[in-house]
Amino acid sequence: MGYQELSNEQRRQLIDAQQVYGGYCRTEAALEAMPRLRWQSSKGQRYLYEAKGKVRKSLGAESEELKVYKAQEDEKRAGLEDSLKGLEERLDKMAPVNRALGLGRMPRIASRIVRALDKEGLLGKHIIVAGTNALFGYEIASGVLIGSEYVATGDADLVWDTAQALQLVGTGIKREGLMGLLQRIDQSFVADYGFNARNRDGYMVDLLCPDQEGNPQIREEGDLAAVPMAGIAWLLEAPREEQVIIGEDGYPLRLVVPESRSFALHKMWVSKRADRDPLKRQRDRDQAAVIAELAVKFQGKALEAGDMPWLPDALRGEIDELTGRAGK
């Protein structure tokens, strides 16, 4: 079968962890959105200045109205900071329980990379997670844990949405490159021939993009090149699914992946390519079958072309075979 349904205890713990993490993210976002206020003196007069990001402006000379406004904002900020601290403490207490219950799934290094992408505002908008790490999202969406033989991996496949290239200006990945982001996480990451990054433990990160002419590159000198790959565009054209999963460290993270059936069909298609590593073909088919079964059995989806209008003809042709494999 390739998976095991979560126990009631695991379900309760996962739901609690997701709720606390959701509260943490909302509180953190509210805190980051608040302007920073400070008094500044000039020529014997105090002025209240407001800073939002890189924009700073004066709200005017000191007045009773501005004093009240600053006091209210300071109280609001203190309340949010206190709430955030409490939520952090709850996540700290939940982490060892999550690990003990077997909910900590995504490898630590992969979890840290995905969190960094999310922090930079890249996850889901510019970059989605594919490859084996995507299975951690599909299993949570289905309320199961997929067998280790399907999810063990020593690399991370990141898919760059080239249609969003112009919007990368000003983001962290544009300033320092993907290599800079990876080296913030683990200084041992180095570019391996410019097409992937590898750390001292052999963990590899690939940045993939559609195999289309005229794709813009975000690569600076010394950074990774996005590797064009046939069929990747189909994953970007499919709807995206978002799940809060638990990393191997016991802490939650947000994961954005291609729609599950599209991912499974793409895996089947990839397994038949002449240039596919023969050692990976059977695993591709096994992963495809498990994900398809979960989509139908636990997510209420149908493996029917009419239910997936975004599918290209090449993937529609894989439906019958995948239907036959799912559930075996």
Image: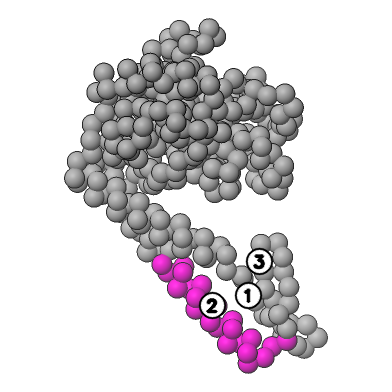
- Residue 286 on image: x %, y %: 35, 18
Q: Is residue 107 visible?
A: no
- The residue carrying pointer 1 sits among few (fewer than 14), some (14 to 19) or many (20 or more) residues within 10 Å by Cα, namely many
- Residue 56 on image: x %, y %: 72, 69
Image side of residue 89 versus residue 227, left or right:
left
* On screen, residue 13 above or below 42: above
Magenta stretch, residue numbers: 61-83
| Callout 1 amino acid | Leu
Q: Earlier in the sequence, mark 2 or mark 3?
A: 3
Return the residue found at the far left.
Answer: 8
* On screen, residue 234 above or below 25: above
* On screen, residue 195 above or below 97: above
Q: Is residue 72 part of the magenta span, yes or no?
A: yes
Image side of residue 10 versus residue 159, left or right:
left
Return the residue found at the far right.
Answer: 43
Residue at 73% x, 77% y is 58
Q: Nearer the viewer, residue 59 or 2?
A: 2
| Residue to which mark 2 is pinned | 74
Q: Secondary structure at mark 2?
A: helix
| Callout 2 amino acid | Asp
Q: Quadrant of residue 297?
A: top left
| Callout 3 amino acid | Lys
